[in-house]
Image: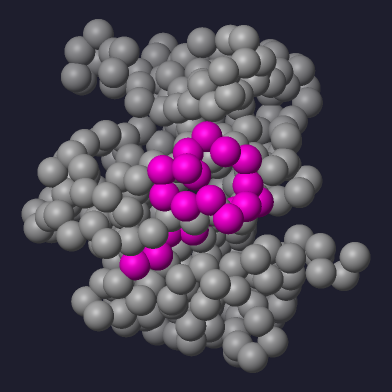
Amino acid sequence: MRCILSLTVVVAAILPMAETPAEVVLEPGDDRVMVAIDGEEFTNYIFTGHDKPILHPLLAPGGVPLTRSWPVEKGRPGEPQDHPHHESLWFTHGLVNGLDFWAPRAHAAGPDGPIPHVEHRSIDVCESGQSGILETTSQWVDAEGRSVLTEHRRMVFSGAPATRSIDVTLELVADAGDVTFGDTKEGSFALRVRPELQPKDSNGSKGAKGRLVNSEGLADGAVWGKRARWVDYSGVIDGHPLGVAMLDHPANLRHPTWWHAREYGLSGANPFGIHDFTGEPEGTGNHTILSGEKLVLRYLVVFHQGDADAAGIDRRWKSWTGENRQ
């Protein structure tokens, strides 16, 4: 059964004037919601079978994967098999009320033991149209299944001939007591690119020939731990110049955020890891959501042709945030 058709147009703020919005169709299933753009698969919101909901695969027009397939899919040549918690595109954090939601199995009693994890609860809105809108509710729970917080997520999927994008809003509600997101680099809103977009080969990967840049003009290894409005990976895949950008919204906590962005292909927007990124005293980056209150974070992920300059990522950030009207 398809999601309902929506005629609402919400893509003008994130698409250049020359691009025409595509038809986005959302198809719910038993364990996922499939997202297609102009009849071609874009991604799946997978909500069972993992420690947290993930988006996988993430495909450029023509069906070219831009994020690493492993460990969700196995057997792609040249892919590194490190950091099994790096599952395409996801949101978690490594220190939440003292619990590790980032790589929880590292601290479990055994490989199959109970762990902190994020449980999908419901699909609240599912609309197809010139943009696809998916709203979900999830529960962050400890190893005993007790609630730590509730997450309401809104994802707006958009497309045009040269780009695809996901506008993600995360509403984190402290409905089970105070919630402290701790000062650690291990987080938070993140993706893992395929090897061709990596600046360097590492951990057994092959074919790295990409470039990592940020909005402040830094490149490759210099991007890690720095504050920026956006970061971008780009490279050549099967002869096609392609890239992925992640954009931080000015309304977010501590904008511009710090980036846990590595030359081996991890990119994570992390407003909490100040100690690891800057050397400030431990706990400097702690942020507590008081009981009954909430924290809202918003990010835009853009899948594009060419590098950051060719794709106009800085212009996209200004259009998305309204900064070009000031």
Q: Where is 193 relative to 243, above or below?
A: above
Query: Which residues, given as a range, are shown in magenta?
Result: 216-235
Tell me the residue at 69%/21% (across/down).
287
Left or right, residue 194 beside residue 317: left
Horizontally, residue 37 falls left or right of residue 325, namely left
Task: Classify the position of the N terminus by image quarter.
Answer: bottom left
Q: Is residue 294 magenta?
A: no
Residue at 39%, 59% in the rendered image: 211
Q: Is residue 270 left or right of residue 45?
A: right
Q: x, y percentage for residue 130? A: 61, 80
Q: Position of residue 156 (x, y in %)?
A: 60, 63
In which quarter of the view is residue 182 placed? top right
Relative height, residue 127 to residue 296 (above, below):
below
Query: Can residue 35 be seen here?
Result: no
Q: How is the image coloured?
A: one colour
Q: Position of residue 13 (x, y in %)?
A: 73, 72
Quadrant hosting residue 50: top left
- Answer yes or no: is residue 230 visible: yes
